[in-house]
Image (tube, coloured by chain):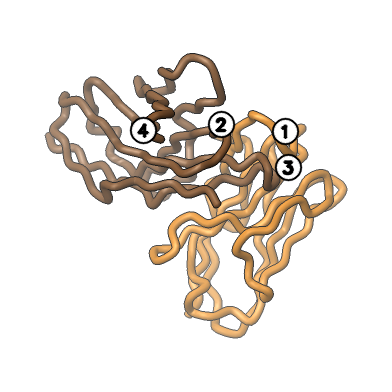
Chain colours: A brown, B orange
Amino acid sequence: AQSVTQPDIHITVSEGASLELRCNYSYGATPYLFWYVQSPGQGLQLLLKYFSGDTLVQGIKGFEAEFKRSQSSFNLRKPSVHWSDAAEYFCAVKNDNAGNMLTFGGGTRLMVKP
Amino acid sequence: DSGVTQTPKHLITATGQRVTLRCSPRSGDLSVYWYQQSLDQGLQFLIQYYNGEERAKGNILERFSAQQFPDLHSELNLSSLELGDSALYFCASSPVGTGNTEAFFGQGTRLTVV
C-alpha cells in the first residue's frame, strides 16, 4: 500500500527566510503527488500537483515542488516566507488503482517568526 | 472558495447519538470523497462515491455510512457515536472517478461528541 511520510512535524522559520518541507512517498507506480495547505479553521487548499512531465512544478502563493523519483521525494519550497504562510502543510499521493483516493502524510506545521 | 459546501460547520452531540453531515460538490463534479481528520489518526480517507455509486472504501467504521443522491450531493451518517469520533470531517469532489484530476475540499464539519 502507498504511504507518505513528512519527517518534520513542526518547522519554524523567520519571515523572509527560505523554506523547504520534506515529503517522501512509497508507491509502486508513477505517483500523482499533491501539496495541500490548511490554515487554522480552514479547509484544505491545493498548492500544487505533479502528474507527469517537468519534475519542477510551480504552484500558488509562490510555492514550488520538485519530484525526485530516485529519492521518492516531493519536497515543497518557497524562497521567501511570509507571515501569512503559517499553516499546516500536507503532502499526498493519489492511488489511481483504488478509486482516486488520497493518502496523506502526517502534516508539517509551519510557524513564522517576525 | 473551493465550491464544495459542507453543512453544518460545527456539530456537538452526545455519545450514542446519530448525526448526518451534508456535502454539496462543485458544480459538475461527479465524485465525492469523505475524509476524517483527527489528532491521533491524521487525515484518513473514508469513502468515495461516483455518480451515485460507491467507488472505493477506506477506513470507514461499520457505524458510519454514506450515500450520494441523484442531484450528486452526499451525506455521511455517523451512528452510535463515541468520544473518539470527534474529528473534522472533510468532503471533497472531483470531476471524474479516476484520472489525473485534483480533488477540491470543503471547509469541513467539526464534530464534537460529549
Which labelled disc corresponds to residue B11? none
How far across and how far down the image is residue A9, in percent? Answer: 27, 50
Residue at horizontal 71 percent and vertical 53 percent from the top: B56
Give the residue drawn at x 43%, y 58%.
Answer: B42
**Residue A21, position as x, y percentages in the image:** 29, 36
Residue pointed to by mark 1: B95
* Label 3 SS: strand
Q: Residues within 10 Å of mark 3 (few under 14, many from 20)?
A: many
Q: CA distance from mark 4 to mark 2?
A: 13 Å
Amino acid carrying label 4: it is Gln
Q: Which mark is residue B31?
A: 3
Between the C-alphas of marks 2 and 3, the distance is: 22 Å
Q: Earlier in the sequence, mark 4 or mark 2?
A: 2
Front residue (pair B100, A46): B100
Q: Residue at position x 77%, y 32% from top?
A: B28
Chain assignment, label 3:
B
Which sits in the foreground, A35 or B79?
A35
Pointer 2 chain? A
Q: Is residue B109 at least partly visible in the picture?
A: no
Q: Are marks 1 and 3 in contact (CB under 8 Å)?
A: yes
